[in-house]
Amino acid sequence: MTSTLLMDIALLLPFAGAVAIWLAGRWPNLREAVTLVTAGALFAVVITLLARVLGGERPEIHPVQLFPGVEIDFVLEPLGMLFATVASTLWIVNSIYSIGYMRGNDEPRQTPFYICFAIAIGGAIGVAFAGNLLTLFLYYELLTISTYPLVTHKGNDEAKAKGRVYLLLLMGTSMVFLLPAIIWVLAAAGTTEFTAGGLLSGTGMPTWQVSLLLALFIFGIGKAAVMPVHFWLPAAMVAPTPVSALLHAVAVVKAGVFSVVKVVVYVFGVDYLSSSGAGAWLTYAAGFTVVCASVIALMQDNLKKRLAYSTVSQLSYVVLATAILTPISVMGAMLHIAAHAVSKITLFFAAGSIYTAAHKTEISQLDGIGRLMPWTMGAFAVGALSMIGVPPTAGFVSKWFMLQGGMAAENWVAIGVIFLSTVLNAAYFLPIVYRAFWRAPPPADAHHPHHGEGPAPVVLALTITALGTLALFFFPDVPLGLAEAMIADQPVPAPEPTALTEVTK
């Protein structure tokens, strides 16, 4: 089977799955089986493509030309392959988790939930495969629209109000900033095709225009949640936990930071931004977001809100690493996309398990819960250590590459931000682990009955992702290979990264 045919299948499969889920909606077991089969089939297709991309293939599809210079275009390169692999892998695990969570909490409207989830994954695959800015924009907006019903799933006044914030902020930023930026690129370069080395590198644009255009992209890609375009993310915590996992780990925020890296590398060009100085301000914007969001997270007692502000901070690690503008730091940005995905989904899975089994949402309520739910809180501890950047977890690997890139560029601001935020990460994660395992649970009574773990599918899913967080430290070959391949694809000679990868072996 050709790679282009496999790309066609991957692009269509989630939407076909959504239709099949709708047809099976009257029979919950069949509906969930269809979800799992579709997720498994997508994973199989993506993994087949992964092997071919690592082998040097760069398949392309050019299905529709709207008018000269503007077409729907799909090209599979290493960065997009990484995002597609993350989304397709975690869809399987999130589906397993969703079955346990949605049934365990007797959630309403489960069929629309699974339908919208499948469409959102389809949007993520489209973003990953996009060969130009127009295609990326269309699937980016589809991702926003398909996740809005998931954010408002509970249907109460609070969910509707927070859903409006989510929709208006994400679509507002993309229409006001992102779309004009795309039109500007088309006017300047005559095309919006992603180009190795940077589409704009030969246009001769003045530095101030390049800097302004970069700002339009950074704040127009609202899903990356660079402050002040971050309010949608804490607001979306009103959604059920599987949706929070989708937003924070599988698709939405990953589409945001993926798009930032894609634009910097393939629209502007790392070397072009570095030599012109037009991207210098991005280090400060991302660094401010990393530190400020960490401080806000430290003040949250609600577990999901603390995790939400942690996500705002961690996303800007990817932006910060990209802003350092060295090949090693861009590799670190790619690695952190994978590391954050598997670590943060573990944390949200654990939060949902606690809610399902114990109906607790506040950190101050978690005394001794690790003794009652050792699998859940053990997985949480692994995810927390990865967010801090402690070996042997995935977060250490990506932070190591970021620091190496910062030192290579002598970007002491970025290095200082990474060290300070690591301390802040420890300050807001370690007390949760301490409270869970080293404090005694309250006496069992009518208000605090003793309980066990969450539903089996929930515990299974969070155990898998916790093991994945560890596995990415010991076996980082796939994301590392994709990161090296992306750097190798760039026309400007880059410093050889392999000597710095020995720490991951």
Image (cartoon, helix red, strand yellow):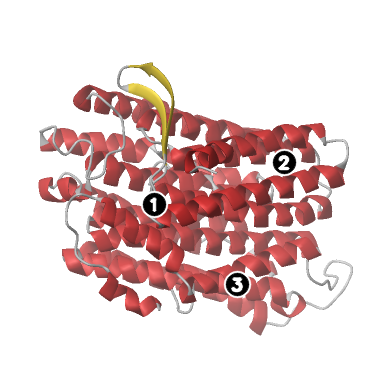
In the picture of the structure, the residue carrying the numbered disc 3 is: 467
Q: Which residue is disc 1 drawn over? A: 78
> Which amino acid lies under the numbered mark 1 shown in the image of this protein?
Pro
- The residue identified by callout 2 is 114
Q: What is the C-alpha distance between the residues marked 2 and 1?
A: 29 Å
Quadrant of the image for the N terminus? top right
Q: Is residue 157 visible?
A: no
Above or below — where is 370 with respect to 82?
below
Crowding around mark 1 (Cα neighbors within 10 Å: few <14, some 14 to 19, many 20+) is many
- Which amino acid type is marked by label 2? Tyr
Q: Position of residue 313 (x, y in %)?
A: 42, 57
Residue sitting at x 62%, y 59%: 348
Q: Nearer the viewer, residue 55 or 126?
A: 55
Distance of mark 3 from mark 1, alpha carbons? 24 Å
Q: Is residue 337 visible?
A: yes
Residue under the point 19% across and 59% down: 494
Dot 1 falls on a residue whose secondary structure is helix
**Label 3 vs label 1, nearer the camera:** 1
Indicate the amino acid at tag 3: Leu
| Quadrant for the C terminus in the image | bottom left
First in sequence, mark 2 or 3: give its number.
2
Find residue 477 and report its horizontal and vertical position in percent. 43, 68
